[in-house]
Amino acid sequence: MAQILKFIYAFIILLSLFFVVTNSSSFTRCRNDVECPQYSCLRGLKMKCICFKCMCV
């Protein structure tokens, strides 16, 4: 019985972490390139507003 509860608790924690990670990686809405944060991209890439979403290009 205790092992089942531990499994359920671990599953809930992993599931909640999954939702946090998928929600934080959502695209930023924008109208032009100025509204996009420049610190989010890897070196050599720039943030561009494409189809009203900020994306690294």
Image (tube, helix red, strand yellow):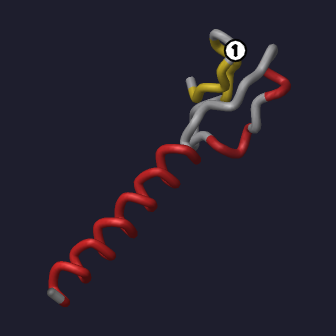
* Image x and y of residue 10, in percent: 30, 74
Q: Amino acid at mark 1?
A: Phe
Mark 1 = which residue?
52
Q: Residues within 10 Å of mark 1 (few under 14, many from 20)?
A: some
Nearer the observer, 28 or 32? 28
Q: Residue furthest top?
A: 51
Nearer the observer, 18 or 38? 18
* Image x and y of residue 15, in percent: 37, 58
Q: How many marks?
A: 1
Residue at 58%, 47% in the rendered image: 24
Q: Residue furthest bottom?
A: 2
Q: Is residue 55 left or right of residue 1?
A: right
Residue at 29%, 67% in the rendered image: 11
Secondary element at image label 1: loop
* Image x and y of residue 20, in percent: 52, 54
Q: Residue furthest front?
A: 1
